[in-house]
Image (cartoon, helix red, strand yellow):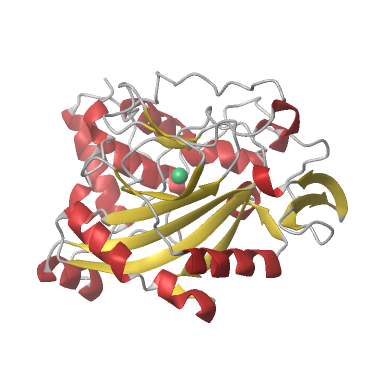
Amino acid sequence: MANASIFRPVAPPRIIEDAFTPDQHARMLDIVRRNGPWSLILAQHFKSPEEVVATTSGSVPEGFKPTWDMFLSPVFRGYFGTASTPFYPEIEDCFFNSRFLALVRDYWGAKYATPENMLFNIQGPCSGGGSPHVDATRFRGVSMQTTPIWLMNIMVKSNLFERWRAKKAQVITWYYKGRIGGGFTYWPDGPFEEPKQINAPMWGRAVVVENEKMFHTAETNGPAAMRRPEGLAIHSMMEADPENAGGWRITTDSKVIQKIPEEEFRFLVHWGADIFMDMAEFKRAHDHTDDLTHEMIFDIILSDLRKRGESFATPADPLTDTAFIGLLTRVYDAGQPTIFPPEPVEREAA
Ligand SMILES: [Fe+2]
């Protein structure tokens, strides 16, 4: 039985306006225009279509051959900074952002926050509503570098590892003038409740949020005929269009497959922080006095499975045992959103 209360953020998302000054926005956009081309989000996270499937379920069902085509979506990404390090001195004030730090501390009721990462998504028209997700998280002692994402997903869904889960918050900001969709859809009361939407057009509108614990997705945007450019491939790139001030273009193997006018360009800036409720928690995180190990993780999971009365053969290698992974996927299924807002309506062009 899915436990819907697992996927609710620590507090209702808070919407703010004018997250960045016009000058900050201009400097961020200038970096994106000057430093492309940028690759697909999908290409940055996965090496094969099988890996996309395995990320949620731990393994690929036998006889099933996924293709990139099933997952391709023309949304591109780049990083302004990671590991608390800004990559562009021109926008250090956006990264070490006192206003954002105050917002996320207040959101959690926490004493301390550290800017952790800052990235951007850029895109033209795209269909969106069908891919609600929660963002990947980590735990003390457990990160993407040491542990497969499917296991970290199970750890979140099981709710057995909250003591070790890294507390995080984000400020997500949008710049999008398009007139068809392009908002943000989110399920703040859990995946089985009504979603809410932050609607476009928006220019500097932002949300303070905990996206590791709340299903969310971009709303479909732009003219339907442009949402899936012909020739889009896993290695497609997006960059400023040198022939059109303010415009953009998508290329595949250096061939232009789509030109995106400025008014259809959607720019999302994601700023993420680590949160520490108090000095004791900050120290636990940095002194590594209370880290999880893989052995501890499986001890906790196995004892929970026994408590639930599940019968199973103790796996020799739980990280690769497909029958065991299948059991975890079934037992800790926490559900997916079931109620969706209507798709945006495309009005006749005047
Ligand atoms: Fe997300």
Classify 39 as above or below 127.
Answer: below
The residue closer to the viewer here, 307 or 138, is 138
The quadrant of the picture occupied by the N terminus is top left
Visible in this render: residue 316? no
| Residue 39 against residue 266 in the figure, above or below | below
Residue at the location (77% across, 51% down)? 249
Q: Nearer the viewer, residue 54 or 4?
A: 4
Is residue 282 or residue 66 the one in the foreground?
282
Q: Is residue 76 visible?
A: yes
Q: Quadrant of ligand 1?
A: top left
User: Which residue: 66% across, 42% down?
Assistant: 264
How many numbered marks does the figure carry? 0
Residue 216 in picture, x, y percent from top left: 42, 36
Q: Is residue 38 left or right of residue 219?
A: right
Q: Would you identify the image quadrant in which residue 331 lies?
A: top left
Q: Is residue 190 left or right of residue 79?
A: left
Expressed as whole percent of the image width and height from the top left, the position of residue 31 reads 62, 69
Q: Which is more toward the observer, 248 or 147?
A: 248
- Quadrant of the rendering where the C terminus is positioned: top right
In the image as oriented, which residue stretches furthest toward the front? Answer: 350
The residue depicted at 31 percent of the width and 36 percent of the height is: 157
Q: Which percent across, then down, holds residue 233?
A: 77, 43
**Residue lying furthest bottom:** 89
In the image, residue 105 lies at what x, y percent?
21, 60
Instruction: Identify the residue at horizontal 72%, vertical 25% (top origin).
Output: 349
